[in-house]
Amino acid sequence: MASASSAVSIGIDFGTSNTVIALATDDGRVEAIRFDHGGKQHSVYVSALCFWEDRPGSGARAEGGPWAIEQFLEGRHVHRFIQSFKSFAASASFNTTQVFRQRFKFEDLLAAFLRTLASHGGDAFGFDAPTIMVGRPVRFAGGNPDEALAMQRYQAAFERLGAGHARYVYEPVGAAFSFARQLERDATVLVADFGGGTSDFSVMRFSRQGGTLRAEPLGHAGIGIAGDSFDYRIVDRVVSPRLGKGTSFRSFDKVLPIPNRYYTNLARWHQLAMMKGDGELRELKELARSALKPDRLADFITIVDLDLGFALYRAVSDAKVALSANDQTDFRFKAGGIDIGSTITRAQFEAWIADDIARLGATIDKVLTEAGITAQEVEKVFLTGGTSFVPAVQRLFAERFGDERLTSADQFESIAYGLALIGHSPDPDRWTAARRG
């Protein structure tokens, strides 16, 4: 496939944790772009950026994906490592972040990230392709997400890349189109897309007329709970207390609690990376001087100072994955002179995420209500995303729909595949996600 061909449709699934790009031709063929790194081919491009200067004042350079992680881990230069920045898209409180002597808006970060992706994609695609379909959440992450602001930022980023003509589609709709290729008969399908920052649900009615696949959207719903939320529960219960949460500091003749807002940053990886530039690290160092347990705050400061958030993220994520297959796991984070260890049982983890599971269940009920159907009328349930493998999530769907109706596919590529296929559907504009107030 070549981007110069008008027959190619590009699907871009920009995710909180990972990004995938797929190409589809009008004969129905679809494939993900592969990136060569470390002697292997990868279809998943980690949604991360690393900025660095070869020497002070030489100007910032940037890398993305696995190359960003490689640059960060080598640590040969002063750098800024930023990941999960999609979570800022709909945040009105996020204006800019400082990278050396330059301030970056969200659209600056997204454009820089996509440029690095294009540079490693070779001749496989270009942003000048006539058909570009970009995935977007049904509901953006954040406590009070501003959808219109998020879409303005997306559009500004793609315009800078010469792709102002890109169209935007709800991510679960993309996943639904990918799954629909497997259908042998007409069916009403619930698609559940679990990302890093959001979980999105769509109900679609698929039918074949004259050999052509037809689709009718019945309802959409989303919530800002997903894989990162489950990670948060592990951090909050296991890691944060070891780093000073719940302890106190002395202010004149009073003993006051360490503010919890610092630990919210710790639990959310994209915010942890920003602490160096927004003054919170300086505040934390001042608190440590009067803390009753200064060694715990010192370890927290070390994690931020040495950019150990990525290693911490990996350790927490590994524990979560292990609990999907085992009744318990030994969590261990050891770096920078810090050593945190704890045994976590699946029963504990499921108790920690119980409220999250209940809210996911309420969102499923919401999308069924919007679609005007009952759970019994759903013929297939398509689950995609790593969080769909969490046993408590599996039970949530099994209890509502029955095991026999559940199915899943590649946890990373399905959305991008479907987005690319939509570009070749009879009316791609029909699937463009309207802004909802």
Image (tube, rainbow, N blue to C red):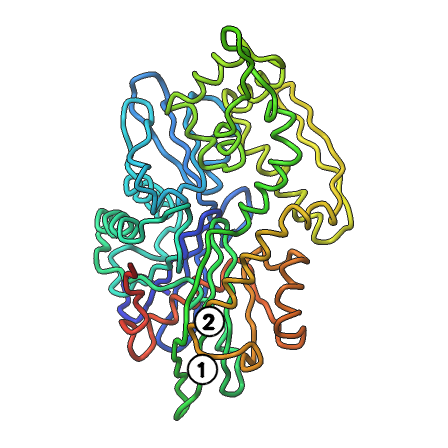
The residue at the point 68 percent across, 50 percent down is 350
Residue 429 location, x and y as percent? Answer: 27, 71
In the picture shown, does residue 38 fall above or below 388?
A: above
In the rendered image, the residue lying farthest to the bottom is 210
In the rendered image, the residue lying farthest to the top is 252
Residue 48 location, x and y as percent? Answer: 44, 40
In the rendered image, the residue lying farthest to the right is 327
Residue hosting label 1: 206
Residue 260 location, x and y as percent? Answer: 52, 29
Image-based side of 320 in relation to 45, left or right: right
In the picture shown, does residue 166 fall above or below 237?
A: below
Tell me the CA gap for discs 1 and 2. Answer: 9 Å
In the picture shown, does residue 302 fall above or below 321?
A: above
The residue at the point 32 percent across, 37 percent down is 93
Residue type at mark 1 is Phe
> Of 248 and 188, which appears nearest the observer?
248
Element on which disc 2 rests: helix
**Tags 1 and 2 touching, CB below 8 Å:** yes
Residue hosting label 2: 176
Residue 171 sits in quarter: bottom left
The residue at the point 58 percent across, 80 percent down is 376
Residue type at mark 2 is Ala
Q: Quadrant of the C terminus?
A: bottom left
Element on which disc 1 rests: strand
In the rendered image, the residue lying farthest to the front is 253
The crowding category of the residue bearing disc 2, from other C-alpha atoms within 10 Å (few below 14, some 14 to 19, many at least 20), is many
Q: Earlier in the sequence, mark 1 or mark 2?
A: 2
The crowding category of the residue bearing disc 1, from other C-alpha atoms within 10 Å (few below 14, some 14 to 19, many at least 20), is many
